[in-house]
Each structure stands twice: as structure tokens, then as C-alpha cells.
Image (tube, grey):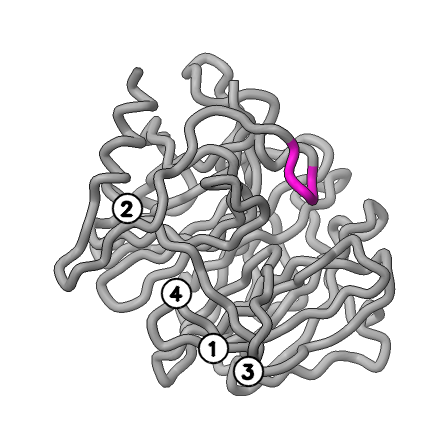
């Protein structure tokens, strides 16, 4: 009952200026989507921390039948992008927007137009550029014969226009990306869907966060992410600690969980001791695995996490 109450609260949220929800977030599991059999049996939950290392669960469910969360702060609001099955819109990109640090949410479908064509983004990677625009990088079809990554721009974080193709790869190299500023340089990390590439990602750099340079062989410019000596993980989120250090959050393919690593240059990483979040089967809200955490630092100095877990 507690979970249902939380969902009803977020549905009722609205902001000044008339921003209201496009849909009601789902509760419970659904039949498999077009892509990914496990997607519609997962949910997004929240946790908070005072130091970015020890997180306490809120025991609040933002939505069920969702995955690939990407959280950012823009102005005085939180924007949570994710892939959803809401209202039978399988594999639709949505954004949940909060004006009260994640206590309540408004749910919007994200529109991505490419001329007269409407794109269906998969694995969203969104950042705010220095001029205030939202930049969305995404893959459209990771299981097709080719897999192209695109960029799209938006002034409001909801309505995007495709700006061009970032890169195109042959089948087997479909990926999600994570793009973060480290010092004066933007870094982007492309993760392949092939199991052999978990823990190894393509690495590109940019001076403006828009145009990135890779090695001639994109996957020869690789970075190793290792949570322990025997456990590779893939990056899902990053936050700046100071001008010299950035903390990356990551999950392992085999066991899930959330770990963290520190970098100063975006190429070499040092694992931090302990686990940031692991499965809690006793709370009745999650099962099987927790993973794919996305973390931001709130204006009050605390840390807010959204993570993926299986639905009991």
C-alpha cells in the first residue's frame, strides 16, 4: 500500500506555469516490450546521502516498468530521463520533473523530431550545455543491423530536435553513453552491449560538450572501470567533487550493486572501498538486483540517487 500511495502522490504533482503529467506511471509488471525482456519487470526507486558514499533508501517508487535512468539538475528542477512502457508506449523516452528535490514528480513524454520523422531514443544521455540548452545523446536501435548514435537539442528538456549523427557502428557494438565534464574537458564513454565489453568503454573528449574526438578505432580508445581486482563494472553516473576529482558510480554486469570510483583525468580510475548500494530483499520493494544508479548533488549539499531494481 505504501508503494501505491507514493505513486499517487507523484501523479498529482504539477508546477506553476501549467506543467502537468502526460501519463500515469505504471504500477506492477507488464508483458515484454519490443526490446528487452526484463525491462518491464523493473522499477525506479530513490535513496539519499549526506556524503555521496552511504545512501539511505527513501522506500519511494517513482515508477514501475522503467529503466536506463539519467538524472540531472537544471535551474531549480530535477530532470529524470528514462525508458518506459507507460500507457502501452513501449520503449518510449520519458522525463519526470521535480521542483521539490525529488519529493513529487510530473511525467512527460519526450519528443525527439528529426525533420518529419519522430525518433525512438534508447539509453538516454542528457546534459546541460554552457548556453543552457539540453543536449540528448542516444541510440535508437541497439539490436538492428547498424547502430547509430544521435545528438538532439532542446530549450525546455522535453521537446528535442535532432542535430546530427555522433557515430555509427556495426551490429554488436550497440551502446549507451555517459557524458561528463572533468576540469575544462568534456568526456564521453560509450558502452557496448556485447558481454565481452562490460567494464571497457570507448572514450571521447570535447572542449564544448558537443563535438567529440575518438581514436580512429572507437573501441581502441578504451578505459577500464574496475570496482575490485576481479569485478569489472560499467559507468552509469558521475558527479564533480571539486575542481580536480570526479566520482563515478558504476554497476557490475554479474551481480549488479552500486560501486564508486574516483578519477582526476577521466582515463585512470581508483575504486573507493565498500559498496554504495546493494540489494535489500527485506523492504518488499525490490528483488534480484539493484543497479544503474544515477546521482546528483542537490543545492542543499546532499546527494540524491535514482536506481533500478527488480519488482517483487
C-alpha distance separating marks 2 and 3: 29 Å
Mark earlier in primary sequence (4, 1): 1
- Residue 187 position, x and y percent, is 59, 73
Is 23 placed above or below 279 here?
below
Mark earlier in primary sequence (1, 2): 2
Q: Which residue is labeled 3 in the image?
A: 210
Mark 1 surroundings within 10 Å by alpha-carbon count, few (fewer than 14), some (14 through 19), many (20 or more): many
Mark earlier in primary sequence (2, 3): 2
Which label number is shown at residue 158? 4
C-alpha distance separating marks 4 and 2: 14 Å
Q: Which residue is labeled 2 in the image?
A: 105
148 relative to 122 in the view: left or right: right
* Circles 4 and 2: CB atoms closer than 8 Å: no
Is 258 placed above or below 238 here?
above
Inspect the magenta stretch and tell me whether residue 142 lies in it: no
C-alpha distance separating marks 1 and 2: 23 Å
Rendered residue at 39%/60% (across/down): 72
Q: Which residue is labeled 1 in the image?
A: 153
Amino acid at each position: 500500500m505504501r508503494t501505491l500511495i507514493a505513486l499517487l502522490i507523484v501523479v498529482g504533482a504539477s508546477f506553476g506555469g501549467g506543467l502537468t503529467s502526460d501519463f500515469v506511471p505504471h504500477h506492477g509488471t507488464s508483458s515484454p516490450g519490443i526490446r528487452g525482456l526484463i525491462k518491464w519487470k523493473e522499477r525506479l526507486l530513490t535513496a539519499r546521502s549526506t556524503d555521496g558514499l552511504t545512501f539511505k533508501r527513501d522506500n519511494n517508487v517513482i515508477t514501475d516498468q522503467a529503466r536506463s535512468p539519467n538524472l540531472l539538475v537544471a535551474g531549480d528542477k530535477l530532470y529524470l530521463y528514462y525508458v518506459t512502457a507507460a500507457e502501452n508506449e513501449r520503449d518510449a523516452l520519458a522525463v519526470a520533473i521535480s521542483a521539490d528535490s525529488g519529493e513529487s514528480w510530473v511525467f512527460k513524454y519526450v519528443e525527439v523530431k528529426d525533420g518529419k520523422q519522430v525518433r525512438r531514443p534508447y539509453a538516454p544521455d542528457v546534459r546541460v550545455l554552457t548556453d543552457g540548452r539540453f543536449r540528448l545523446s542516444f541510440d535508437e536501435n541497439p539490436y538492428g543491423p547498424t547502430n547509430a548514435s544521435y545528438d538532439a537539442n532542446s530549450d525546455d528538456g522535453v521537446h528535442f530536435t535532432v542535430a546530427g549523427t555522433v557515430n555509427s557502428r556495426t551490429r554488436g557494438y550497440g551502446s549507451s553513453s555517459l557524458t561528463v565534464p572533468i576540469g575544462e574537458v568534456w568526456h564521453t564513454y560509450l558502452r557496448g552491449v556485447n558481454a565481452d565489453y562490460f567494464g571497457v568503454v570507448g572514450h571521447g573528449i570535447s572542449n564544448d560538450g558537443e563535438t567529440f574526438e575518438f581514436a580512429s578505432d572507437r573501441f581502441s580508445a578504451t578505459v577500464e572501470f574496475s570496482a575490485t581486482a576481479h569485478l569489472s563494472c560499467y559507468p552509469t553516473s558521475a558527479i564533480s567533487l571539486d575542481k580536480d576529482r570526479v566520482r563515478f558510480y558504476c554497476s557490475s554486469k554479474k551481480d549488479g550493486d552500486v560501486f564508486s570510483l574516483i578519477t582526476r583525468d577521466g582515463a585512470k580510475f581508483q575504486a573507493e572501498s565498500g559498496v554504495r548500494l546493494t540489494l535489500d530483499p527485506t523492504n518488499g520493494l525490490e528483488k534480484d538486483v539493484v543497479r544503474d544508479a544515477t546521482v546528483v548533488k542537490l543545492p542543499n549539499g546532499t546527494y540524491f540517487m535514482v536506481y533500478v531494481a527488480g519488482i517483487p
